[in-house]
Structures are given as C-alpha cells and as structure tokens.
Amino acid sequence: MALFPISSHFHGDFVLKLVPVDTENTMDEVAIAAAEHSVGVHVPDQPGKVIRARKQGASEPFPRTMILADTGLEPTDTVEFYYSEA
Amino acid sequence: MALLERSEWYDLARATEWTPTYITMDELFPPEHSGGVGLPDDVWAAYDEPYKVSFREYVDVQRQKDEGAYSVKAALERSDLYNKADPGWISILKEHYAAVALVEYGAALQESRFARWNKAPGMRNMATFGMLDEMRHGQIQLYFPHEYINKDRQFEWSHQTMWSNNWVALGARHYFDDIMMTRDSVETSIYANFAFETGFTNLQFIGLSGDAANAGDFTFSKLIQSIQSDEARHAQLGTPLLQMLIENGQKDKAQNHIDVSFWRSYRLFTILSGIPMDYYVPLDVRESSFKEFMEEWIVTQFIKSIEDLGLEKPWYWDIFMADLDEHHHGQHLGTYSWRPTLWWDPAAGVSPEERDWLEEKYPGWNDTFGKVWDVIIDNMVNGRMDKTVPGTLPMVCNLSQLPIVGTPGKTLKDISIVHGDRKYHFASEVDKWIFQQNPERYRHHKNLIDRFLGGDIQPANLDGVLEYMGLGVIGPGGDDVHNYAWLDAYRKIELAG
C-alpha cells in the first residue's frame, strides 16, 4: 500500500485536480475519490450511472476492479473520469 | 546665464562613451550581463532611442506628474471611495497593488543593470530615466494603498505578496525572474520592455485608467495615467535593439524572444486583467470585454509593431486566438472556487444579467463554464457552502505556475513530458514548447504541487497550504466580495419553481 497522487480530469470540470489515492485501490475506488472533488462541486451528479476511468487519451476504460498498481500509471498522471451506463 | 538648446548638446551627452585602457571591453561589459553576442562593435553607438529627454526636462515633468497624482489623492481622501465604490472595484485595487507595486522595484533593478551593462550609450542614458521611473512607480503604488490598511487588512498584501509563497506570487515571481531579472540586458529589454511593457502593461494601464474613472476612482485613474506616461517612454528601450538584431543576421533570435515573451506575458495578464475586466468591473460601467480589449490593443496594435520590424506573428497564433475565448474564464472559476487562497475578495460576476453579458461576448459560455457555475450556485442557494470550496488542490502548470484549466467538455487537457527524473505538466503546447526551449533554465523550479507532494508544505492539508501561502498570517484570505448578495436573483428563481 502506498499513497499515490493522480491528476483527475473529471469530464465536465474546468480544472485538473490533485487527488490522493492508494496503489491498492480498485479503479472504482479511485473513481469515488475523484468524484468527491468534482461531483456536486463543479460537475452535476448523474444518479444511476457509473463512473469509469481511463488514462488520458485512451479509448477504453480500465476494468473497474483493476488495482491501481496494475494500471501502469505513474504518479501525477492524468486520469479521465466520465459517466457511463455500466 | 543662457542655457544651450537641448539639440545643441544632446547627441554629445548621450553618446559619451568610456574608453577603457586598464581593462578589456569584456571586463567592462561582461557579455553575460551585456548581451548582444555577435553584434558588431560599431552598432552600439548607433542605438537611437525614440524618446529624447534631458535630466532637467525629466525632473520637471516627473514633478508635475507626482504633483497631479498626489493632489488628486489629497483632494479625494475625504470622499470615502472605499465605502462608496462597488466592492468589486476595491478588489481590483487589492489585486493590482499587491501584484504590481514591489515588482516595480524589481524593474528599477532591471533598468539599473541596463544603465551599467548595456553597450549602447544611448540606452544607458535612457535606462537611467527608466530606473527612476520604476522607483517612482514602486513608491507611489505602496504609498497609495497604505491609506486603506486601517479600513481593510487585505491591503497589507501590497507590501507583502512578493515575499510570500502565495500561488499568484509564485507565478508572478517565476515570470518576472524569467523575463526581467535573469537575462542579459539585450534579452531583458526585449522580454520586459518591448513585449511586456509595450505589448501589455502600457496598453493594460490605458484600459485600467478608463475603468477607474468609470468606477469613480479618480485617484487610481490619475495614478495609473502618471505611470502609463512613463511606460510609454521607457517601454521603447527594446525596439532599437530588436532592429539591431534583425539587421545583423539575428532575426530568428529576435523572433524567438518575441514568441516566448509574448505568451508568458499573456498568461499572467489573464489573471491580472482578464478576470477583473470580465467579472469584477461593475456591469453598468464595463466598457469592453477582455477579449475585445485584447483584440483591439494587442492583436491589432502589438502585431503591427512587430510586423513593422519585419517579424511575424508567433507560431502559436491560432492557439492564442482560441485561448482568448476560454483561459481566463477557467482561471476565474478557479480563483473563485479556491477563494480562501486569495488576498482579495473575488466578485463572482455571474448574476443573471452578467451571464447575459458573458454569453453575448463569449457565445457558448452558458453551455460550458456556465454549467459549472450552475452547480456552484445550486450549492449556495441550498445552503451547501462546504461544497463550494474544493477539498483538494488544482494541478499547476510547471511553466506558467497557474492551474491547468480548460473549457469544460472541450479543451481541458494535461500536456506532460518527462525530463531527467521528473515529470512536468503544462497547461498548453506553448508552455511546453517554452520549457523545451531551455529546460536547464526551468527544470529546477518546483510549482505549488511539487512542493506539496515533496513535503515542503506542512501539515500536508489545505490549512497547511494556506499558512504556507501567508493566508491568515499576512492578512485574511478571500471570500465573496458582495457577501453573496448576487444570489438573491437565483433564490427568487428557485422559490418560483
């Protein structure tokens, strides 16, 4: 376990945000951490949808259960978070 | 005793030159300070300043300027501007004085280095007056806000900001150290005098003086006019040097200097001018948008001035033009959202009427930046104030030192590179390009996030960050300058269902 800072680009937000997460977090848990600083703060909530995460510029999201340490992300890399039906 | 006409002695005085015999020319004018490597020795005497002034004339004119500004201040001191002006205007004063006053003393050092190191005697002569100009600007812009300190402690930042690690101060110091304090006299005169002063300061002060008069602040208007008239003179110092570079086979170098300095100056002005012009100046006295101002004064006039020299628009011109529509809106949302980190109280500037104005000036604003404001307003109207101040920090550009912002849903993007053992983040391709022009110049500097992650800020939380910046130490941080009165219109809309 290790503290791991990411740069969060939550779609609909106007600024990249520093979000502390943990290397053992799943990408769902990382998304929850990012949402805490954007959803209901600068981005409206979309109840019923899930938040997916992908590396900036990637076409596909990370699997929701993937552990952060397995993603290949480096500290302060930018992750895009966006609402999805599933 | 009759005095000679200036024309009878001026050229002799301005061209008077040292002839060293015990030391070499390089010892008298060390190249790392003087600059202009590769320029022939005989070009320096040909430096021709566009403004001619003698010391006697200079002192007389400056005395008149000071008399005018100080007289207006004395006459209006009892008019209670502080309580009568729109609070948004007071915030502009706080932002301006803290960001500008001490930098003027830095500029005095810059000009004194020209007076000593530049190899053109004409420039050394003019830089002496420029040095005196900047001392006056520093003194007057520390003295005028001093009268407000007993009304509002945020005015103490006029004296303190540049000694602090406030995030705006970090950005401003990085910029001014780059363009004004750490280059040789030829480069500095192009970066600071030509690009920054001619391109931005001189013109921005014209706009600010008009806004001040419209807001009823004739003291500030007179102050700014007296400074601008100095800038109009010494801002010209760099132009003859640009001509010398171009005429002596260094056109590419001249173009590069313009390309770097123009962008760096523009980015800082999005904070100093962009935000106040479009959000703080009361709507009923607002004359033009930041974009309109930039298009008239910078796009048209500054570009004409470089094209007259035979140079071209910077390569990133399309990026710059698109940026005029968005960057300062993002920085305004950021400064307002993180308002406890400011030394002034920001004006939201997004009442329904103001939003109509923004939409007219920046079509599409309501569907992009306005959507973010909708969330903030909803929280405020429904009493969720804790949700209106973010619980973390923004990512910060390693070149501009400003938060990395973009148009929501469109242009927000991180541009990063790895250099040496560090990853650097940039807010634009231009910021990255400037870093890559000279990574040795920039690579050691740590932005606010680097310091936070590196453990320089303790405790490593928002309270620690605020204390690191001097908030609550030097003076109180920011809160809504209108005490959220602008929300009344939205409360009525909410009640009406």
Image: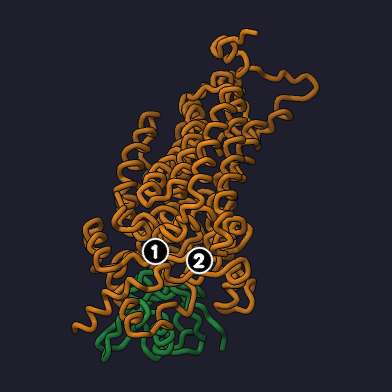
Chain colours: A green, B orange
Callout 2 environment at 10 Å: few (<14), some (14 to 19), or many (20+)? many
Q: Position of residue B94 (x, y in %)?
A: 50, 58
Image position of B170 (left or right of B302): right
Q: The residue under label 1 is which amino acid type?
A: His
Chain letter, disc 1 residue: B
- Is any part of residue B253 visible from this angle? no
Q: The residue under label 2 is which amino acid type?
A: Leu
Q: Secondary structure at mark 1?
A: helix
Mark seen at residue A65: none
Vertical comparison of B58 with A57: above or below: above
Quarter of the image with the N terminus of chain B is top right
Residue at image position (61%, 67%) is B470
Vertical comparison of B190 with B158: above or below: above
Q: Earlier in the sequence, mark 2 or mark 1?
A: 1
Callout 1 environment at 10 Å: few (<14), some (14 to 19), or many (20+)? many
Mark seen at residue B332: 1
* Residue placed under numbered mark 2 in the picture: B342
